[in-house]
Structure formats: structure tokens, C-alpha cells
Image (cartoon, helix red, strand yellow):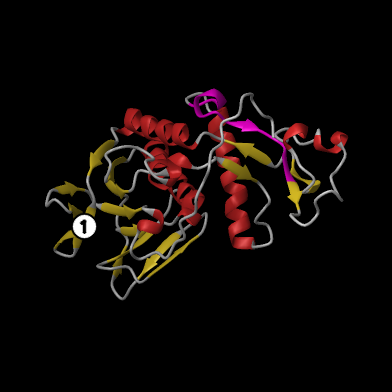
Amino acid sequence: MVLIATALSASLFSLICRSSLAFTVTVGRPTSIRANTSSATMASASSATPSPPKTVVIAGGGVIGTSTAYYLAKNHGIKSVVVDPTGSIAPAASGKAGGFLALDWNDHTPPVGRLARRSFALHAELASDENFGADKIMYRRLTCAAVIVDPNASGTGKPSGRKLKEVDWAQDDAMDDNVVGMRPLGDEDTIAQVHPKMLCDALFGDAKATAGCDLVKGEVDSPIYEDEKLVGAKLKDGTTIAGDALLYATGPWTKQVFGVKYHSVLVPTPRVLTQ
């Protein structure tokens, strides 16, 4: 069984791992993937319906890889071996993002909107789980606002100090005449934040404690087959890892996936913000 996951499908794969599903497995390179909350299908000319895997090799130690390992361990008792080039958890985008969560910002795109809403709910569930808790992953509900800036509006449209006070992170003495207004983007019912690195560490830690999940330093080069059956993964250094399922969860670094790499800038503040 070979699966390819993108950042867009992180919550989807969490749902897959939470469910009792029948998989149709591609022998060789997969040609298509179809999935919903009740079934996942990988179709090819030759297929079979196997029993659930005993060991899953996961290429990528980010949020997709660690959340998959967590739900496989928690709901199915399945062990995972997470493989990452750095030998650490969440070394790239998953550990350096801002951890911003919005419930309804993708509602205009129904397939993505449903995933976003489910992802928002899953984060809230983890925050309330006794093995996690909000403090362990720094989960909190927030409000959100945008400050509107017009570089051509100097001296003409600065909002009142009273208006800017509604924006927790905007200091009046730091604002100039280019600021022309603010717009609320959400409240505690629709906006939340989590510490992404702490979340990934907690997910992997729980998977390790529950099902003996391992972390290996290396890069997955290719799946290994014996008699048309997946038996493991070959790493670029020539070593092999035994397993009867393989998940590529390397985001835009996955060769078969065309992704976009964005920059994320984290700005420390002298006080705790609620927005």
C-alpha cells in the first residue's frame, strides 16, 4: 500500500486513520487516489483487499506524518516508523508556521472548506484530550482583525485611536497616517491558534507510547516489493525498513506533488496577545 499525502489532506488522512476502512491497494505505482470520511480507494488495473497493515512507514515527520502515526496508534494499535532527513520531528514548515486555525475561511471552496472545518474540530478535540490538553500544545481561542493600510493615504485617513484600540496588536504610537481602518475577521468561535512544533511533538510522543512508533533519520528512496507485495521501504543510504504500507507525507518536497512553499515570519511580542 503506497499513499501520497499533501498538506491540503492532513485532516483528511487523520479522518482515514480514525475510521475502519476497506482499502483497495495498487500493486506498483498508484494511478489515482479517491477518499472520503467513510472510504479510501486507490485504483489500478490490479487490486486486492488486504487486512490492515501491521507497520506503516511514513516519509516525513511533519504534521501529516505525525498525525497519521497518532491516529493509527490510538484507534487501531498500528505501529509507524517515521522517516525524516533531519532525524527530528517537524523540522520544516510544520514546526515553523504560526499555527493559525480558521473554521470558515475556506467555505467558498466546499471540498477544502469541509476539510478545514473538520481540521478545526480535530485540533479542539486534541486540546481537550487528557493526554494532550491546551497547555501542552499551547492551544487557545482568539479574535482576528486586519488593519487596512493605504500607502497613498498619508495624512488623510487615519482611524481614531478608539478604533485602533480594538486591534490588540496595533499600538497607537506605532501607527502612521497610512492606516485607514480595520476589519474584524473572526472571533473565539471561529479562530484558534496552536503551537505547531509542540503539537507535532505531542502527536509523535503519544504514538510512540501507544504503539512503539519509531523515528529514523534518512530519506525514503523507493518502496520494496516481494512477489508484488509491499514489504518495506528503501532509504537513500541503502538501508531498508520493514513495513506493509508506505505513506509519502513530505508536502511540496514530494516529487509527485506540485506544491507552493510560503514564508512564515514569527514576531515575538513583549506581552501576550489575545488577537
Residue type marked 1:
Asp
Q: Quadrant of the C terminus?
A: top right
Q: Residue furthest left?
A: 238
**Mark 1 falls on what kind of element?**
strand
Q: Is residue 268 above or below residue 241?
A: above
Percent position of residue 268, x then y:
56, 31
- Judge by depth and name the residue closer to the eye, 149 or 56: 149
Residue 141 falls left or right of residue 243 = right
Q: Name which residue lies at 35% across and 66% down.
A: 256
Residue 7 falls left or right of residue 102 = left
Q: Quadrant of the N terminus?
A: bottom left
Q: Name which residue lies at 81% across and 54% down.
A: 153
- Judge by depth and name the residue closer to the eye, 68 or 103: 103
Q: Which residues are magenta?
A: 132-146
Q: Is residue 86 magenta?
A: no
Q: Which residue is mark 1?
A: 221
Percent position of residue 171, x then y:
74, 32
- The residue carrying pointer 1 sits among few (fewer than 14), some (14 to 19) or many (20 or more) residues within 10 Å by Cα, namely some
